[in-house]
Structures are given as structure tokens and as C-alpha cells.
Image (cartoon, helix red, strand yellow):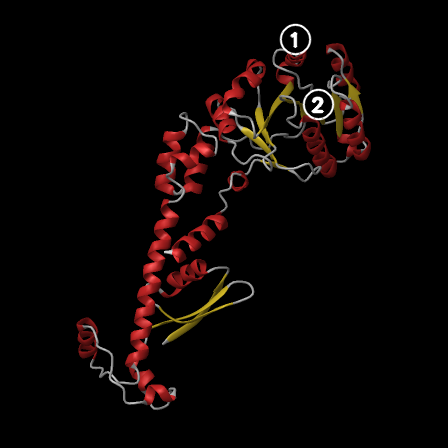
Amino acid sequence: MKIRRFQGSNTREVLGQIRQSLGADAVILSNRNLAEGVEIVAAIDFDEEAVAAPAVTWPQALRQEEKPRAESPRLEDERESKGVQPTRAVEPVRQELQALQALVEKRWGRAQAVANSAPSCDPQWLKNLGFSSQLLPQLESATAELGARAGMRQVLEGQIGSLANPLGDGGIFAILGPTGAGKTTSVAKLAAQQVLQHGPESVALFTSDTYRIAGVEQLNIYAKILGVPVEVLRGPEDLLTALQKHHQRRWIFIDTMGLSPRDGRLDEQLQWLDALGNGLQRFLLLPASLAQYSLDQVLQPYTKLSLGAAILSKLDEAPACGAVLEWLAARKLPLAYLSDGQKVPEDIHALDWERLLDSMGLQSSTLAAATDSRYHEA
């Protein structure tokens, strides 16, 4: 008989290890809770003759002359075909093991059914994440076939896409977006990452955010910490002068004003930024919390521009970002970065679909825990 110990964070995980290592015919001998999770002892190739041998010492209770439990015809047939005679001492143990194995397999089947069905195919669950009719049919089909996490990734990755190596070997990058999106902090994060890798002499910061109170001062604080220069832009002439002054710096980041889409100054700023043509990379910063009814109105001025990619911000505050993801999918605007906090530079990350799914509440561990609780209740 082959006996092994298996340990894991929960019962479902350990049962999966047992099925993978020993197969479906394994039997459970014992289980106990550990500080870190669960331990289960399982066996395969149960040998009745070895168990019945005199060398094995059984508890006194098993040596008593008790009436054996009724055996099923299938078990009796198996014994006869193997030439094995049942013993009164072993039979209660064997039947207990078989009953336990049947219970484990039944619960495992329930757990698998729950994991495969919830919450992947529930249209209301998808709507709660912010998705509407545009992507719902694709998401329902993909999640029903592949499960919640894999199906969601397949659709989003196919419909939105990503921008590999967004900052490349250098360039001029303008961070655009509505008010409150976190443009200044995002500029500081991106600049700080380049300073850490290539040194402060490789980076310069520009800002046209002269409208917001303390906007310039906030960027100046970041620049002082990073040891990089700041240039304030009040018009296209300032932009051209600043570019000439810092032409030797490999990465130039421009923090822009966030204004109402009805404010004429926003269109004016976008026009002189757009005049740089392909020499300027335009990243649209989108808060994950933007709702469907306001997306088109708030972002309408930016749709006129040649946008390179998008940055999804405030993921730590709004996991239901389906509306924004649908907006990106409709315009085939790829994602470059995810931002999920205020720390500079830690809380900005090159796009990682697994990280995005985690931010949306699709953690594998969370689903496993939910599955465990649901089949235990059953």
C-alpha cells in the first residue's frame, strides 16, 4: 500500500493534489488542521492481505467477535475474483474507507461544478462589473466555456490589446485625461521609474497645469525629490523653447491640464499639443470609476487626437471598471499601464492582465475559498 501525506491551504487544494498524484482510486486515511492549512494522509493500492497479517497490531475493539457489516455484491465479487477471504477485523475498516472515499468524490464533484459555473456565466455579475450590451455576449460565451478568469482575459486581451514597452528607448510623452484622473501623480511615477533605471540626467518634466491650484507646486516637489528639471508651459511657444532646452534628455513627460470638456481652454491646449504630430506620444489616463453614462461626454475631446495608448488609474478604488474597458475596446485603444495607488513609483505597472483580473475581484484564491464554503454548506 502506497501512503503519502499532502498539505495545502485548504481541503480543495489538497484533494486536487491527491487526485493528480494518486488518481481517483485513492482513499483518505486521516486528515487534520494545521496552522497553515490542512494535512490529509491518502493511500493507493489497498492490500487486504497485508492488513490482515499477524504482524499488524489492531486495536482491541477490532479483535472482538462482532457481526461483520453487510457487503455489497460488487465487493464480494471482487474478493472472490482475487481469491481474498474477508476477515472480521479488517472489514469494518475497509468499509469505512470506502464510505469516506465515496464522500470525498461526491464533494469533489460538487466543488468542481461550483467552480465551473459560478460566477462565470451570470449576466448580472458581468453587469455589476460595469459591462453592458457591447461585450456581454462575448463575455458570457467565453466565461461559460473557459471559466470566469480565463474567459474574461481572453475577451479583454483580444478586444483591447496591450502596448509592449510603452516608453521604449525615449521620447516625449503627454499624459492627458479628465480632472481628478491622477495625471500629476502618474507623471511622477513614470518619471521616477526612469530615474531609478537611467539616472536623473535622462528625464525632464513639463507641465501645462497652470489652472489648478498648486498644480505646478506639486510637480515641483516631485522634481526636487527626483533631481530633474521642471518647465512650465503656458502656450505652444513655451513648449518649443523647453523642448530645445532639454533635447538631450531621453524621456520628457508632460503633465497637462484637466478641464471640463466644455471649457475652450482644453481644446486650445490639445491643439498645440497635437501640433507636434508623431513626435509626441499621447497617453490617455482613465479613472477606473468612470461610469457608462458619462464616458462619451467626458472623453469626447480626446477622441479627436491620435492616441497611442491608455493608462487605467485608481484601480484600488473602483474594481468595477467594465465601462472603461468597453470604451477602450470600442476604439481599439490598447492599455499601457495600470495604476492602483498613490505610492511613487511603486503603484504603476506595465499592463499585466493577471493583475487587472485581480483588481476586478477575480482572484483565483478568492474563488477557491468561495467554492470550498459552498460545497461544505451543501
x and y percentages locating residue 161 in the rendered image: 49, 30
Residue in front for this viewpoint, 171 or 206: 206
Q: Quadrant of residue 15?
A: bottom left
Residue in front for this viewpoint, 40 or 289: 289
Helix, strand or loop status at disc 2: strand
**For the residue marked with disc 2, what is the amino acid?**
Asp
319 up-or-down from 377: above or below: above
Q: Quadrant of the N terminus?
A: bottom left
Tally the numbered discs: 2
**For the residue marked with disc 1, what is the amino acid?**
Gly
Q: CA distance from mark 1 to mark 2?
A: 18 Å
1 vs 2, front mark = 1
Helix, strand or loop status at disc 1: helix
Is residue 315 toward the left or the right of residue 70 in the image?
A: right
Question: In the image as oriented, which residue stretches furthest toward the front?
Answer: 377
Residue holding disc 1: 264
x and y percentages locating residue 319 in the rendered image: 54, 36
Residue 155 makes an appearance in the image: no
| Crowd band around label 1 with a 10 angstrom C-alpha radius: few (<14), some (14–19), many (20+) | few
Q: Quadrant of the C terminus?
A: bottom left
Is residue 30 toward the left or the right of residue 168 in the image?
A: left
Residue in front for this viewpoint, 6 or 359: 359
297 up-or-down from 248: above or below: above
Residue holding disc 2: 255
